[in-house]
Image (cartoon, rainbow, N blue to C red):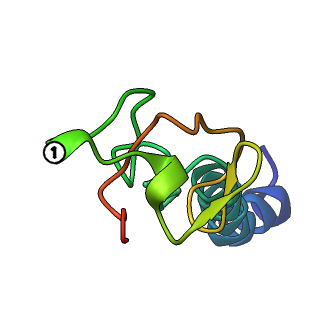
């Protein structure tokens, strides 16, 4: 391998690491159900998404991304 090519590849490594990191962050942001320990069943004391201030009819949430169940629950639950 030529010296110039080796140097260019070494210089590209930080950009590759940044790109992978950005992709992971986007993926994590797209699905944060694990982060908030979301579950499809009621939480402590029967708390449900339908009774949470962050619930959006019919099956969405302002905090947890994606489709959720009105009967679900997560650690961000708030009356
Ligand atoms: S914050 Fe949690 S408990 Fe409240 S609606 Fe969203 S997922 Fe359900």
Q: Is 14 rendered above or below residue 39? A: below
- In this rendered view, identify the residue nearer to me: 31 or 49: 49
Category of crowding for the residue at label 1, using alpha-carbon neighbours closer than 10 angstroms: few (below 14), some (14–19), many (at least 20): few
Q: At 73% from the left edge and 57% from the top edge, which residue is drawn?
A: 6
Q: Secondary structure at mark 1?
A: helix
As drawn, the residue found furthest toward the left would be 45
The residue depicted at 57 percent of the width and 53 percent of the height is: 28
Residue 51, given in percent of the width and then of the height, sits at 46, 57
Instruction: Name the residue: 61% across, 46% down.
Output: 31
- On the rendered image, what quadrant is the N terminus found in? top right
Q: How many marks?
A: 1
Q: Is residue 51 above or below residue 18?
A: above
Q: Is residue 45 left or right of residue 68?
A: left
**Left or right: 49, with 29 as reference point:** left
Residue 43 picture location, percent across and down: 26, 41
Q: Is mark 1 within 8 Å of ligand 1?
A: no
User: Residue 18: where, in percent of width, then height?
Assistant: 65, 68
Q: Position of residue 19 (x, y in %)?
A: 73, 62
The one of 28 and 35 positioned closer to us in this rendering: 35
In the rendered structure, the answer to whether residue 70 lies left or right of residue 43 reads right
The residue carrying mark 1 is 45
Relative to residue 63, is residue 2 depicted above or below? above
Q: Residue at x 80, y 66 (%)?
A: 8
The quadrant where residue 37 appears: top left
């Amino acid at each position: 391998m030529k010296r110039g090519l080796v140097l260019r590849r070494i210089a590209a490594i930080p950009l590759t690491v940044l790109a992978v990191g950005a992709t992971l962050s986007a993926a994590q942001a797209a699905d944060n159900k694990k982060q908030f320990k979301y579950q499809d069943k009621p939480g402590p004391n029967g708390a449900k998404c339908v009774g949470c201030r962050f619930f959006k009819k019919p099956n969405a949430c302002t905090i947890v991304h994606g489709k959720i169940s009105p009967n679900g629950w997560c650690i961000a639950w708030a009356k």
